[in-house]
Amino acid sequence: MVEQGHGSIVLFSSIRSVSVEPGQSVYAMTKAGIVQLVRGAACEFGARGVRVNALAPGVVETPLTGPIRANAEWYDAYAKKSVLQRWASAEEMAGPTVFLLSGAASFITGTVIYADGGWLEVMLFRAGVLCVAAEILVLPGFGVLGLGGGLLVIASIVLASQSFV
């Protein structure tokens, strides 16, 4: 891609890159590592026309989640953690992936899209924390602008007083 001068890479992370439960530390660590890889690769390859992003699903019905789905109580508990009150199908991850690979995302790089049905927003709301996992832009005189809702979440805080050069 670098030799061609253009391209798009989409890696798969997870909501576990920013939210962990007991017994998931190794999985969460690998998914957080993917987020950092995306950020670093986006910085390294962007000037050569290659974009690097990640998709971070919530709970998705796959063979990996089979043991959870086999237990109705556990399955329902996980479904209730999202705003949409359900699990995603694997097919629902195709749309955001195709978007990130397409020309429609030509100015998006180093970004993580959380396709989690609002899981992180609900989790943070229940914990009394708002917009921590969302990109937060603090502008003097304008207050706080947050982009959350499970649509576009970047897990970074940008202060307008910082140098962007």
Image (cartoon, helix red, strand yellow):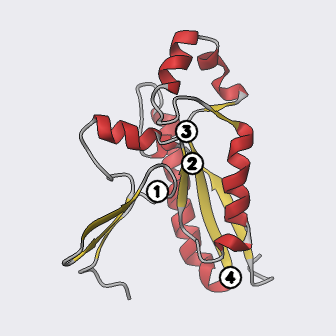
Measured in 3D between alpha carbons, the distance from the residue under mark 3 to the one under mark 2, in whole angstroms, is 7 Å
Q: Nearer the viewer, residue 43 or 102?
A: 102
Q: Which of the two discs, 1 and 4, sits closer to the camera?
A: 1
Q: Is residue 72 above or below residue 88?
A: above
* Residue 76 on image: x %, y %: 53, 18
**Local SS, label 2:** strand
- Disc 2 designates what residue? 56
Residue appearing at x 60%, y 57% in the figure: 54
- Disc 4 designates what residue? 49
**Local SS, label 4:** loop
* Residue 36 on image: x %, y %: 50, 59
- Disc 1 designates what residue? 153
Three-letter residue code for mark 3: Gly
Q: Nearer the viewer, residue 60 or 26?
A: 60
Which mark sits nearer the N-terminus, 2 or 4?
4
Measured in 3D between alpha carbons, the distance from the residue under mark 2 to the one under mark 4, in whole angstroms, is 23 Å
Cβ–Cβ under 8 Å for marks 2 and 4: no
**Local SS, label 3:** loop
**Local SS, label 1:** loop
Measured in 3D between alpha carbons, the distance from the residue under mark 1 to the one under mark 3, in whole angstroms, is 13 Å
Measured in 3D between alpha carbons, the distance from the residue under mark 1 to the one under mark 4, in whole angstroms, is 23 Å
Q: Quadrant of the C terminus?
A: bottom left
- Disc 3 designates what residue? 58
> Dot 2, crowdedness within 10 Å: few (<14), some or many (≥20)?
many
